[in-house]
Amino acid sequence: MNATDKMLSELLDAARKNHVLKQELLQTRTAKDPMDAFCFCAQRNGFPITVGELFEAGEQFTDDIFCSCNGRAEEPIAEWSDAYESFLAALENSCASEGESGETE
């Protein structure tokens, strides 16, 4: 796991436990520049993630799919995901399945 993936994992864990942080991260979707707003929120909360690192994380994931020696992708992927949207989807899904009872404010 690289440093960006580790920080995103730790940020996800923190957001699952902190309702205010979770809401701030989810609200970045409505910002003029969502990824910049996400990184600013992450940095403000002690996770120094940059926009470039988010792009790199998504690119590395897709590169790994195409370069895998065990069943690499033969066909182009119709829909690419990115680290930002994947993070928010994981946050929404984990909170929905766990319920809101374990979060702090």
Image: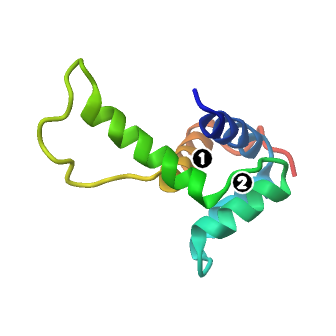
Which of 69 and 86 lies nearest the eye of the viewer?
A: 69
Regarding mark 2 in the picture, which secondary structure is present there?
A: helix
| Residue 41 seen anywhere in this rendered image of the structure | yes
Query: Mark 2 to mark 1: distance in Å?
Result: 8 Å
Q: Position of residue 38 (x, y in %)?
A: 66, 62
Q: Quadrant of residue 70?
A: top left
Seen at 79% across and 43% down, the residue is 103
Q: Quadrant of residue 64?
A: top left
Left or right: 10 as drawn, with respect to 44: left
Seen at 75% across and 55% down, the residue is 42
Within 10 angstroms of label 1, few (less than 14), some, or many (20 or more) residues? some
Seen at 59% across and 65% down, the residue is 35
Q: Is residue 20 above or below residue 33?
A: above
Asked whether the residues under the numbered discs 2 and 1 touch, taking CB atoms below 8 Å apart as contact, a structural biologist would say: yes
Which of 24 and 38 lies nearest the eye of the viewer?
A: 38
Left or right: 25 as drawn, with respect to 73: right
Left or right: 75 as drawn, with respect to 17: left
Quarter containing the N terminus: top right
Q: Is residue 9 above or below residue 38?
A: above
What residue sits right under mark 1 in the picture?
91
Which of 89 and 55 lies nearest the eye of the viewer?
A: 55
The residue furthest bottom is 32
Colour setting: rainbow
Q: Position of residue 17 (x, y in %)?
A: 78, 40
Seen at 32% across and 53% down, the residue is 80
Q: Quadrant of residue 37?
A: bottom right
Within 10 angstroms of label 2, few (less than 14), some, or many (20 or more) residues? many
Instruction: Residue type at mark 1: give it.
Output: Leu
What residue sits right under mark 2 in the picture?
22
The residue furthest left is 75
Q: Earlier in the sequence, mark 2 or mark 1?
A: 2
Left or right: 101 as drawn, with respect to 12: right
